[in-house]
Amino acid sequence: MTALLIILGVLLAVGLAWRLVASRRNHAGISTSVSARTAQVSALATRTAARKATLRLRQLVSSRERKRKLEEAYHVQTSAEAAALMGSMKGVFMKLGQIVSFARESLPPQAREALAVLQKDAPPMAFALVREVVEAELGGTLSDHFASFDEEPIASASIGQVHRARLPSGEEVVLKVQYPGVDEAIRADLRFGDGLAALISSVHKNADGRAIVAELKERLEDELDYLREAENQQRFAAIWAGHPLIRIPKVYPELTRRRVLCQEYVEGLGFYDFLEVATDEEKRLAVHALNDFVFDSMHLHGVFNGDPHPGNYLFNADGGVTFLDFGCVKRFDQAFLDELHGLNGALVHGDHAAFERHVRALDIVLPGRPYDHDFLWGFFRYHGAPFIEDREFLFDAAFLEQAAEVMKPSNLRRLNLPPDLIFFNRITFGLNAIYERLGARENFHRLYWRYLDRNADHPPALATLGVALPERFLASRRWLAADA
């Protein structure tokens, strides 16, 4: 009995110590040490494992319908707990929640909704901390730079939150303010790669956690530097200057620093509010605007805004779309784009020999590894399905759900997706999920000729709807030449 009491006492002490470590936070309420963040994730993983074990036991004596309901309840509770944890931890964990929230094939609607909260808002930090960061970065006091500054944030994200303000000149602006200590937290998380991958798998069984973590490591350091984000945003603003429906907010460089980004305030509906009120025609116009922004930016200018989730769009009353958040931008070199265009063209034309040449040129199969042509053909046919055939294509739930099989980890291990193609997957899954919610149904084959046939000037998607565009947005060859 004495030995048992000693063991129980030790376990209790360890548990209390672990809880103490897990609760350790900085003055902004963010855990920044590896030990504290590991403890929080480990606690969630332990609860999830126990809940899953209980689920399996209960399913042993349940009917098929009861098993389905038990599985659904498990995912809802796990996703709700994960969303709460990710929202409070900020940084990498919240970013993961935004990525996983696009999942359809293994999560019930209530679970997706729990994670979708992270696309819109997260628990905000106190205004005193906002003031501290802004004044430290800009120097002086808030009143030295702003006529007014709203204390309540209008949005909270993975790395910072957004406040509305007014300049002495009367211009309405918003400031993105980085959470104190979030840079330390992110670096701590990235040293805990296996734990991150395990957390992804606990929420989304078909995700390749290691691949997602590897991509995050490549990109999050860039997102911590708002000066770099401001440069990216100004680059996109120059590309799209004068476009009637695609808008990029103006940056105020004189009020932008590494942890503070100042840009113009833009009115608009968030994605989910837009879905509730938009007509079918308004949704169709939005699909075409998104198509032109994403693919013209990438194929004609070699840049891609790599965070395509619903929180980064504002839908304007006149049908325009304002694009936000340029912290994660990828620049593609022309050699990669040429090979990608060649591979896509081979899929369109059914040219297996050309397809193999481009697959090998892109190092999708490493030298000395077995080459399975049929597998690779099917893999890329899925990704190219919207534009391969000359027909109307519907982005529906069935198409998105096929990704569970196509992108399962055992398949991805048969490939060597180079960094550019890993990044390109963000287009595939981020944009596809948004298209599905918008009910996108178009002949994307004809729209995609703008990028497949670069010897002629094919119109952008919006022009096919009759939207009047300045000449420089119509002529893809001349636009590309002028940009170069």
Image (tube, helix red, strand yellow):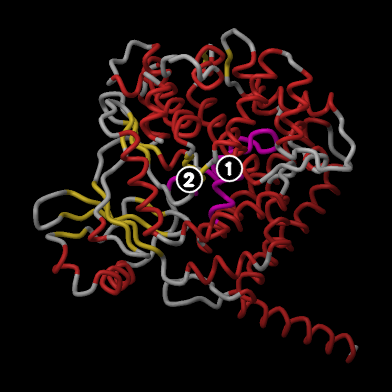
Residue 195 in the image: x percent, y percent? 71, 62
Q: CA distance from mark 2 to mark 1?
A: 8 Å
Task: Categorize mark 2 by other alpha carbons within 10 Å: few (<14), some (14-19), many (20+).
Answer: many
Residue 389 drawn in magenta: no
The magenta stretch is: 94-120
Q: Secondary structure at mark 1?
A: loop
Residue denoted by label 2: 119
Name the foreground residue: 312 vs 201.
312
Q: Is residue 431 left or right of residue 146?
A: right
Q: Secondary structure at mark 2?
A: helix
Residue 83 in the image: x percent, y percent? 56, 53
Q: Is residue 246 left or right of residue 284?
A: left
| Disc 1 residue type (three-letter) | Ser
* Mark before the other along the chain sequence, 2 or 1: 1
Residue 74 in the image: x percent, y percent? 70, 46
SS assignment for the magenta stretch, majority: helix
Name the foreground residue: 9 vs 444.
444
Task: Categorize mark 1 by other alpha carbons within 10 Å: few (<14), some (14-19), many (20+).
Answer: many
Q: Is residue 403 left or right of residue 311?
A: right
Q: Residue at x 60, y 38 (%)?
A: 424
Q: Residue furthest top?
A: 391
Compared to residue 227, the image places residue 402 above or below, namely above
| Disc 2 residue type (three-letter) | Gln
Residue denoted by label 1: 101
Q: Are marks 2 and 1 in contact (CB under 8 Å)?
A: yes
Q: Residue furthest left?
A: 169
Number of marks in the rendered image: 2
Q: Residue at x 56, y 19 (%)?
A: 452
